[in-house]
Image (tube, grey):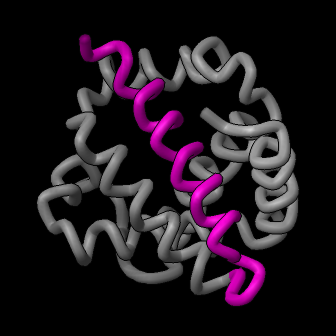
Amino acid sequence: MLSKYEKELLVIIWEKMMPVAEDIGSESLLRMFTTFPKTKTYFAHLDIKPRSKQMLSHGKKIVYALHEGAKNIGTLASTLAPLSRFHAYQLRIDPTNFKLLSHCILVTLACHMKDEFTPVAHAAMDKYLSAFAAVLAEKYR
């Protein structure tokens, strides 16, 4: 469960990351594809080279969704319902991949934020990304 302070911290973090949304998202995806090669299966149609147009575009979409979820954390399930349905019914993404990407986002944020990514920020972001991944995987049940 996220405290009021952690919820506020998440919004602050994502606000700071929005100017580099493409970088955060595409680096996280590239990290996931490199570390967990089986995740590339769902992205055969993308040019998954570093900083490719498609990676930057998809990375930006991911960060925008994370930012929107953080702003609406009280209604996360309903906010993410369209994404959950899309990933489950149309894309049929293995829900394990959401957890793998969450881990890669944490590492990428730590690299970008450096000292600002305090242990408290790390813990809050980890809780949030776990909740985000769980909501995305909800339609698989």
Residue 106 lies left or right of residue 86; in this view the side is: right
**Depth check, front residue: 71 or 117:** 117
Q: Where residue 52 sits in the image (x, y, percent)?
A: 49, 75
Residue 37 shown in magenta? no
Residue 106 lies left or right of residue 16; in this view the side is: left
Q: Where residue 20 sits in the image (x, y, percent)?
A: 75, 72
Dominant SS of magenta comes to: helix
**Depth check, front residue: 26 or 105:** 105
- Total numbered labels placed on residues in the image: 0
Which quadrant does the C terminus fall into? top left
Residue 120 shown in magenta? yes
Q: Where residue 12 sits in the image (x, y, percent)?
A: 87, 57
Give the residue at the far left of this rendering.
38
Q: Where residue 35 sits in the image (x, y, percent)?
A: 23, 75
Residue under the image location 41 percent in, 30 percent down: 134
Residue 3 lies left or right of residue 40; in this view the side is: right
Q: Is residue 139 above or below residue 106?
A: above
Q: Which residues are magenta?
A: 113-141
Residue under the image location 71 percent in, 81 percent down: 113
Residue under the image location 36 percent in, 44 percent down: 98
Q: Is residue 8 above or below residue 16?
A: above
